[in-house]
Amino acid sequence: MAIRTIDDASLSNIADMIRLRLNVEDTYRPDQMAEAISRISGVTEYWKAIGFNDTPPDIADSYEKALDIIENWDGSITDRSNMLNGDDEITIWPGVDMSEVTTLYKAFNGCDRLSSISLKNTSNVTNMQEMCSNSQNLRGFDGSPNFSSVTSIRAMLYGCARWSQNIDWSLPNCTDFESAFEGLGTGSISTPLSLSIKINCPNAQTLHRICATNDWASRRPIVSVELTTSSELSWLREAFANCNQLEYVKITDTSGVADGWRSAFTNCTSLTEIDGDLDMSHTGSLEYVFAGCTSLTSVTNIVMTSSSVYNASRMFEGCTALEDVPILDISNFGTQDYGTDRLYMMFNNCPNLTDESLDNILQMCINSGINPQYNPALATLGFNSTNYPVSRMEDLPHYADFTTAGWTLGYS
């Protein structure tokens, strides 16, 4: 077990706070402080003086500085961009009046020791881009911040590796969520986390990498995401890439997503349920959308009509538990001009498809209209005789139509 030390100044701060709260002049050895602290009452009321609903962490180092911030706060300044950018001393931010503030761009960016923020009266703030980006010690916000006017939270909590607070926010006017929670909670902390994210975002346009992590991240604690969206949403690329603890996703409306599905769920190895229709009718690329989703058994909620899709390479590659897929409409797929290279390895290493799903895939191929001169073969999509013997494929209801349309199995 690692040995942690505390310097004399910190011990002195703790002792000063005990004396202040108990209204005494006693001195304390380190081994006496815990008992003295236990006699302090009204701690929550005490911290309300600096705008907190609950007692924040790092209290001994923070209280006097928080009081100083409140005393010197100029509430008339509207632009608080880069307010504390890179500050390596502040540990908590008190609940100052931000009723006149309109932008908090990079306000707390890179504050290495900052652990808690009290955001009060933020109803006029429109820009929270990179507000707390790379503040690796930040655990959460005190209370429920007002996001009613915010239009962008791009990278707001990017790289907040020790964030440990579930998110249940309403951002009715926000359009830009790119990388908002990328890398959230991925750092090393002693308590295992299971984070959930629930956001009302009816005007969201881009969710690019909203919850993504790098494939080498030590932890990926997000397990559930619910997003209330509308047809304004147009971009989902890499939204949840590498979230290997993510089990459940709900997106209420994807009808406006255009050319924005690539790698949306790549390597979500725990994903078992995607709630809501996944409308892929207007997108361009479906490459890697579900690649590596090893727990996903069904994707029957895909909607694909009058499709403008031109590439679905490796769309389901490595979905080793996948059983059920619908008939996908690839009649406008671009495959008529390019052949099956746009479907390359689409179902590679998907060994558990049902006969009904296999027949759906045959119908998909038949309806594609691919010119036989391209020698279209099911093997190009990743099928092989080991997982799907010739005899099994020949018994499928649409196999004869499949061959009549110019397709072959193409097994080597």
Image (cartoon, helix red, strand yellow):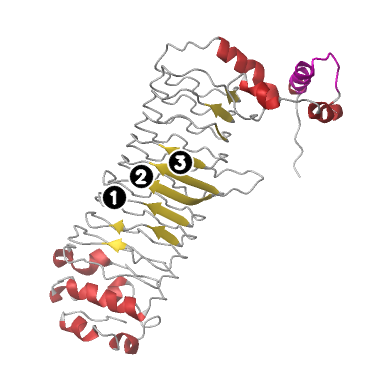
Instruction: Please tell me how many numbered marks the rendered image carries.
Output: 3
Give the magenta part as a residue range. Answer: 11-28
The reply to whether discs 2 and 3 touch (Cβ–Cβ < 8 Å) is no
Q: Amino acid at mark 2?
A: His
Residue type beneath disc 3: Phe
Which of the labelled discs sits on residue 181, or is there none? 3
Residue 138's disc number: none
The reply to whether the magenta stretch includes residue 23 is: yes
Quadrant location of the N terminus?
Answer: top right
Earlier in the chain: of badge 1 and badge 3, it is 3
Label 2, label 3: how far apart the Cα atoms are: 11 Å
Disc 2 target residue: 208
Q: Residues within 10 Å of mark 1 (few under 14, many from 20)?
A: many
Q: Nearer the viewer, residue 250 or 397?
A: 250
> Is residue 112 visible from the viewing direction of this image?
no
- The verdict on residue 378 being magenta is no
Residue appearing at x 47%, y 36% in the figure = 157
On the image, which quarter does residue 275 sit in?
bottom left
Please name the amino acid that badge 1 sits on.
Gly
Is 268 left, or right, of 312 in this rendering? right
Asked which secondary structure carries label 2, the reply is loop
How far apart are labels 2 and 1 at the CA level?
Answer: 8 Å
Residue under the image location 75 percent in, 22 percent down:
14
Q: CA distance from mark 1 to mark 3?
A: 18 Å
Of mark 2 and mark 3, the one earlier in the sequence is 3
